Amino acid sequence: MTARRRATAIAGLTAIGVVAAGCLPAPATVEARRTADLYTTFVAVAAVVAAIVIGLSVFAIVRYRARGDETLPRQVIGNTRLEAVWTAIPLITVAVLFGLTVLVLNAFDDATRAAAGVEIRVTGFRWGWRFEYPAEGIRMEGVGRPGPEAYVPVGENIHVTLTGADVIHSFFVPQFLFKRDAIPGRLNEFAFTVDAPGRYGGQCAEFCGLYHSQMPFTIVAVSPADYEAWVAAHRGGGAGASASPGVAPGGSASPAASTAAGASTSPGASTSPGGSAAPEPSR
Amino acid sequence: MTAATLEAGRQGHLDLLGWIATTDHKRIGVLYGVTALGFFLVAGLLALVMRAELAVPGLQLVGEQTYSGLFTIHGTAMMLLFATPMVSAFANFLVPLQVGAADMVFPRLNALSYWLFLFGGLVILSGFLVASGPADIGWTGYAPNSTLPYSTTTGTDLWVVGLLLTGVATIFGAVNFVTTIVTRRAPGMGLLRMPVFTWSILVTSILILYAFPAITAALIMLLLERRFGATFFDPTAGGDPILWQHLFWFFGHPEVYIIAIPFFGVIGETIPVFSRKPLFGYKAFVLATIFIGAYSMTVWAHHMFTTGAVNLPFFAATSFLIAVPTGVKFFNWTFTMIGGRLTFPAPMLWSVGFLFTFLFGGITGVMLASPPLDFQFQDTYFVVAHLHNVLVGGSIFSMWAGITFWFPKVTGRRLNEPLAKAQFWLWTIGFVVTFLPQYQLGADGMPRRYADYPADAGWTTLNMISTVGAFLLALSVLVFLIAVVEALRRPADAGPDPWQANSLEWWADSPPGHHNFPNLPPIRSERPVFDAREAARAAANGEPPAGSAVAPAPAGPGPVGPAPAGGSPEAPA
Ligand code: HEM
Ligand SMILES: [Cu+2]
Ligand SMILES: [Cu+2]
């Protein structure tokens, strides 16, 4: 293989890499837009770093390939000034990245501390989610697929207090570019403000046992007026609860899916807080 | 000894008892290597089953419970029964040779640590034989999911006990390496004349002594909690699940460097040899190794950003910082090549391949070090891609570089070059096809440790591509095995120094005799064999003897014979 062909191959590999490290979902919250901007900055810096390092290596490979001459090259053992430069430049680069990171983290903290438009308590359990709206008196729970649907108004600060009932789960909505662990014995807080109405799928992201892949949920963002209507229909629990028993792909061994508002008597919820029941392994 | 054994093996009389009873560091190194590769094949097969299952949505091959067992044992075996023991394999074989010693300081402890490792590994795998199946808790074993009543299988107890045994084995090994490096260096070999591989093992061993006690303690606590009523991790009884994560990652993050630093050392050996130049910035490289080791003790909680239980800016800052010494190494490697006279036999192909693949792992690592980005990527396929990028693209690429580089030293035979190159290209393509699509899957939000995913999630195409890549990787391993068998059927004719290399192991026979060296060349730099070769060549040409840093001069013929024995007057530093 000629030096040029090798160089082309390596350049192609690089291009694939840049494409593959790729794109985030379109950000759906105020906070997610910050994350997306930060990510864009990181990718830009990464591209420059990769270009420099790959460029140097490709240059070395192409230019200094042995071409039949048997002479020993000059035995250079180092260059202190060069070495100082290539220590300093990465140091400055990561210092800048760190600064940008802290700015975004501070914004997240501010959102969490800001006055809440809606308070939601979310609990992950084996294998489903419970959403409680203390002020509105709504409590709903869903096991398996398709999981519970929690409504929120767009443009308002939604404050979530998160915990786990048995083992650790993780509340993850890809379009919010955010996840937070639901840990038994701890309360985690975060906040988000959804930009536009829509249905935003979420799922568990911390391995929690047998049906870890079968506990999705949906955040349904609606206009404030529609949200009020939803609250009115569900206030006090019970009303309008759609029990939708379903079977997850894979058949009989999957947990029954159900959504129930007002009560936690859903069939298939094998564990209540404290976690008494363990799953039967499906061989 | 090794030569005779391999010879005998070829004729069907393997000196079995000799191998079982051996305390020779070279044989123990080979035992470690062969056993680790065996576990690699097992863990690789498990990976193939997982990738086959994930190729299309729906559960076709295995159920959820089996899938949990697959990734748990795959991850555990790859990390602790393959990559870590592979470090011991290289270190056992090479460290005494590189420092000019006859053996390790504690040969019997060395044998004990191998047998403990083998036994512990088999205990972990024996989970596949019990009715309730192997451990199903992930290689990270997060509590309380790993406690009763949540993980009911006996396999989890076997996992705990097996890991305790292999952990103790690793600690014994580290004690041996530190002692050997500190006390057994040949006259003239000051600390700053040690080969960078040996330096890497010194730093790694210290890291082991720091990290493994934490996991040992954590595993004992888990066993007490599972079987004897303790409640360390149970929040309903005053325990805390986060405690497990701190203990695990206090070990787990250094562990990642325990299987990276030695392989950086390997690349620090190969690139100079195939560039015909000394390592550019040897002292900076050594210093960077020490810094990486030290920083790696301060970053563990970057695995816990989404717990909401750790100081985000602190652990972000330490994690970002570790990119700096790693960057220094990159420049050491590339500037060694610049101005050199580069040749590309298999070990150099692997080394250059490593530079490109590891770069991506490093870059995505910096992204994960930023907590807001981690909030999206944590526990998704982005992390799966990143960790394999670092482990497969970093450690395993350089492991293959090391295996192809030292194969002639260990066996006396060179690998068939076309086969070795075919293995490299298959592996490289397989690696890119398997793992790069996973970055996009993770960015899209596909969580890791999912036995199945919905058909309408839009993840099917990328998963299918990734699965195809995994089978290319398997094919590459097959080619390697064929190359090994082919080589072992030939007579041993590699000679002591087939690559015109630098460090002392190339002074010994291939394979080295029982006590390694009949004599040693003078050690006046970190490249004693290079110096001896150049001196012999200069003498043959009637030139005045040149030092280590010589001007352009014609290269010598083949390997040179043993030069007059004698060390330099300086004592080890
Ligand atoms: C060479 C081909 C390899 C393939 C095709 C492969 C494939 C996989 C797959 C499919 C998973 C499970 C992903 C999930 O469901 O979350 C996985 C997890 C993992 N792999 Fe590999 N792997 C390979 C090599 C390695 C190597 C060489 C190492 C380490 C040295 C390694 C370490 C891990 C670890 C630590 C995990 C995480 C396990 C867990 O989630 O508990 N893998 N790999
Ligand atoms: Cu889960
Ligand atoms: Cu880490």
Image (cartoon, rainbow, N blue to C red):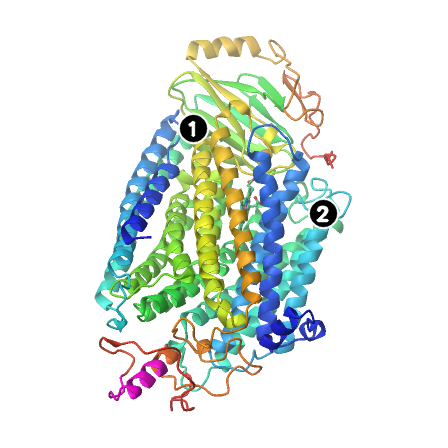
| Whether residue B144 is visible | no
Which quadrant holds residue A85?
bottom left
Q: Indicate the quadrant containing the C terminus of chain A: top left, top right, bottom left or bottom right.
A: top right
Decide: is A19 above or below B421: above
Whether residue B410 appears in magenta in the rendering, the answer is no
Mark 1, other Cα within 10 Å: few <14 / some 14–19 / many ≥20: many
Q: Chain of mark 1?
A: A
Which amino acid, by three-letter code, is at mark 1? Answer: Phe
Reading the image, the residue beneath label 1 is: A176
- Residue type of the residue flagged with mark 2: Phe
* Dot 2: chain letter: B
Cα distance between the residues tagged 2 and 1: 40 Å
Question: Is B449 positioned to the left or the right of B386 in the image?
Answer: right
Q: Is residue A228 visible?
A: yes
Q: Which residue is mark 2?
A: B128
- What residue lies at 36% left-to-right and 69% top-to-bottom? B273
Question: Is A53 drawn above or below residue B341 in the view shown?
Answer: above
**What are the residue bounds of the magenta stretch?**
B532-546
The answer to which of B166 and B82 lies nearer the viewer is: B82
Q: Do dots 2 and 1 share one subunit?
A: no
Q: Main secondary structure of the magenta part?
A: helix
